[in-house]
Image (cartoon, rainbow, N blue to C red):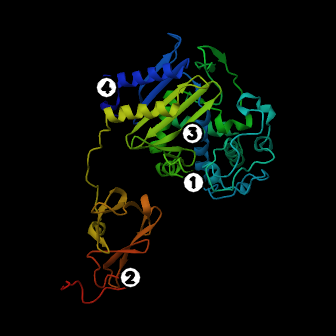
Amino acid sequence: MTSPLTERLLPTTERALLHHVATAQTEGRTPALVAGVGREGRLVWSAVRSAADGDGQDADTQYRIGSITKTFTAVLVMRLRDEGLLDLEDPLDKHLPDTGVGEVTIAQLLGHSAGLGAETPAPWWERSPAALRPGLADVLGEEPGKHPVGRRFHYSNPGYTLLGSLVEAVRGEPWEEVLEREVLRPLGLERTGVRPVAPYAEGWAVHPWADALLPEPVEDLGVMAPAGQLWSTVGDLCRFGSFLAEGDEQVLSAASVREMAAPAAPMEAGEWGSTYGLGLQVFQIDGRTLIGHFGSLPGFVAGLLVSPGDGVVAAALANATSGPQPWAVTAELVRIVAEAEPRIPAPWRPLPEVDPELLALTGTWYWGTKPYGLRLHPEREVELQPLNDYGRGAQFAARADGTWIGRNGYYAGETLRVARGDDGSVRHLDLASFVFTREPYELDAGVPGGVDPEGWRGLAL
């Protein structure tokens, strides 16, 4: 059940949000800007600032969302992985042969590290008919590789075109039909699709030196659709953002959406305030980790940002080619809500049951002389953290064989296990070959290199 505290925002918060959106519309010189904020899967606030009073736009008005489409395509690919139909380390050729770039992996395409070009060969694909690029060869061109494969992040629209074709090859159906059945319908995104359905906004170019408008063409992207075709609303995007924060077993698990948000591509110096996961942009802004994506097409800019730690989603859509910066608009919307109305923590509850053997493992352990605390969490998860100001800690998920696997930090993917003596008693904890003992350098606990049998001593000077 949704808490009454999440059903609407405080008037002061709403006033601050409206001021920010109004300022962005004015300074960004855009015919219209619609924005929304979501919490706990619900749209809790939205507003429209428009050059035309009473034009009827609201949170249900469609705009083109450009490259936010890539996140939807990435979700489809992750579903195929979770079903066992492909592996992210598979070369593209294994599932989609004869592209000419089949040595790149699916993961590299998702994270923009496949070395492919940013755009298609001329003419500018966003403002020209899709009939000029009927196939993948027309999208990739004669020299598709621009960088060594896997060595650096280089944003690639053709790369996501390949991923859309991959989905079609594995599913045996058009990308848009798979998207509708497997993502849009289960998540209730009824106002998101490949073509506009009224009410929708018209796209404009705004003259840089005069308050004058020029209508932008609306082209169907054809084979490029998986890279940027979709239309959506701030209401639908806020619902989609909540899914990206928490997952939905109908579509993709929480573990898989967390994997999408993990940095996947090497960045250049100067870009370390942001990175890219598997279909998601990742930012550090105002001390928060924000995930999402931004997009643009002629006549439109769009932004979606999620702060999983705060439980806040923000979306902003504008109908101007060079409108307000969507990352700045959405990041500020998140900050306003997160700071004015911090998330109410879930109530503490005891574990439904306690395994005595697990309980016996909790408490203080030592890596050499450094103290750590082991805490038990629900679902048999454990957390190992240093008890002073520095050191490497992590959370660990339980595995069926009685070991744990690291979920974050330095020990992500590493195994934690209990080492036992011949009589079954606990000798030590083994974590990626490091030995944790109940006492500092405990005698007979299996510390590598052994422990001096004379034990601890003083030093007479």
Residue 164: x and y in percent read 68, 43
Q: Secondary structure at mark 1?
A: loop
* Mark 2 residue type: Pro
Q: Which residue matches tag 3?
A: 183
According to the picture, the residue beneath numbered tag 2 turns out to be 448
Quick one: label 4 or label 2, which is nearer the N terminus? Answer: 4
Name the mark nearer the viewer: 1 or 4: 1
The quarter of the rendered structure image containing the C terminus is bottom left
- Residue 289 horizontal side relative to residue 80, left or right: left
Distance from Cα at disc 4 to Cα at disc 2: 59 Å
Q: Nearer the viewer, residue 76 or 412?
A: 412
Residue drawn 57% across the image and 41% down it: 71
* Few, some or many residues within 10 Å of mark 4 (<14, 14–19, 20+): few
Residue 369 position, x and y percent, is 29, 73
* Residue furthest to the front: 461
| Amino acid type, mark 1 | Pro
Confirm whether residue 60 shows in the render.
Answer: no
Do labels 4 and 2 touch, CB within 8 Å?
A: no
Earlier in the chain: of badge 1 and badge 2, it is 1
The residue that label 1 is drawn on is 266
- Please report the residue visible at 69 percent of the width from the left and 57 percent of the height from the top: 91
Q: Is residue 229 left or right of residue 251?
A: right
Give neighbour class at mark 1: few <14, some 14-19, many 20+ (Cα, 10 Å): some
Q: CA distance from mark 1 to mark 4?
A: 41 Å
Is residue 304 visible to the viewer in this orientation of the structure? yes
Q: Which residue is mark 4?
A: 10
Callout 3, which amino acid?
Val
